[in-house]
Image (cartoon, rainbow, N blue to C red):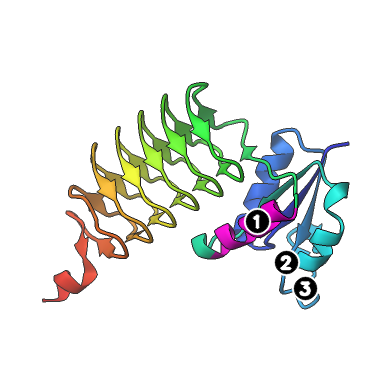
Amino acid sequence: MRRLALLGASGHGKVVADAALAGGWDTVEFFDDAWPLRQQNGPWTVMGDTNSLLARLQEFQGVIVSIGDCAVRLEKHLALQAAGARLTNVVHPRAVVSNHAVLGIGTVVMAGAIVNIDAVMGQAGIINTGATIDHDCRLGDAVHICPGAHLSGHVEVGHGSWVGVGAAVKQGIVIGERVMIGAGAVVLRSVADGLTVAGNPAAPLDARKT
């Protein structure tokens, strides 16, 4: 029996669990640092916190961090990696991932997502429902491409960045580290590290207020 442990009992975690079961895992078990206050996540019982998971790592054929926050997800991912967890990927069977794409360990790819040829994803990433990553894109660690967001070819996204729901990024754009792209934004110019941009065309929020 293939057992998967998920660290992070949230709405995002429920979607990861659903995708894992659809993709062939036999059972999933949740762990969350809000335990014992948080004891249920949808139909699943929360079994303990991070320390509980660390004590039981050898029971699981796979482990993945199912936390939406990019920085926290990467921190937990690296801690589990250092502890020897069998980190894995979860790809929904209705996602399309090219045989010539590279998914870093700890990546989740949700239903309806497409990852095209020669795209490369770092570790602990999220390619959410219906998102598309076109050819030759490069994504750093702990990047979240939200539902319905679209990256054209040759886009680069730095570590820990978030591309919001329904955003569109023009080909060849470079998005820095820890960037927040607002929902529905149309990104036509490269974005420096640490900025939050929104709108059509996307611009830094502070600049839009002046």
Residue at numbered disc 1: 13
Amino acid type, label 1: Gly
Residue 196: quadrant of the picture: bottom left
C-alpha distance separating marks 1 and 3: 15 Å
Q: Is residue 120 magenta?
A: no
Front residue (pair 39, 82): 82
Q: Which residues are magenta?
A: 72-83
Q: Residue 67 in the image: x percent, y percent?
A: 60, 60
Farthest top residue in view = 99
Residue labelled with disc 3: 35
**Residue 195 at x, y percent in the picture:** 28, 65
Position in image of residue 46 (x %, y %): 80, 64
- Cβ–Cβ under 8 Å for marks 1 and 2: yes
Which secondary structure, mark 1?
A: helix
Give, as a three-letter code, the residue at label 3.
Trp
| Picture quadrant of residue 21 | top right
Left or right for 114, reference 17: left
Ranked by sequence position, the earlier of labels 1 and 2 is 1
Image-quadrant location for residue 73: bottom right
Q: Is residue 78 above or below residue 172?
A: below
- The residues bearing labels 1 and 2 have C-alpha atoms spaced at a distance of 10 Å
Q: Is residue 169 above or below residue 6?
A: above
- Residue 82 in the magenta stretch? The answer is yes
**Is residue 49 something one can see in this rendering?**
no
Residue at (69% x, 62% y) in the render: 9
* Residue on which the image places disc 2: 32
Image marks 2 and 3: residues in contact by CB distance under 8 Å: yes
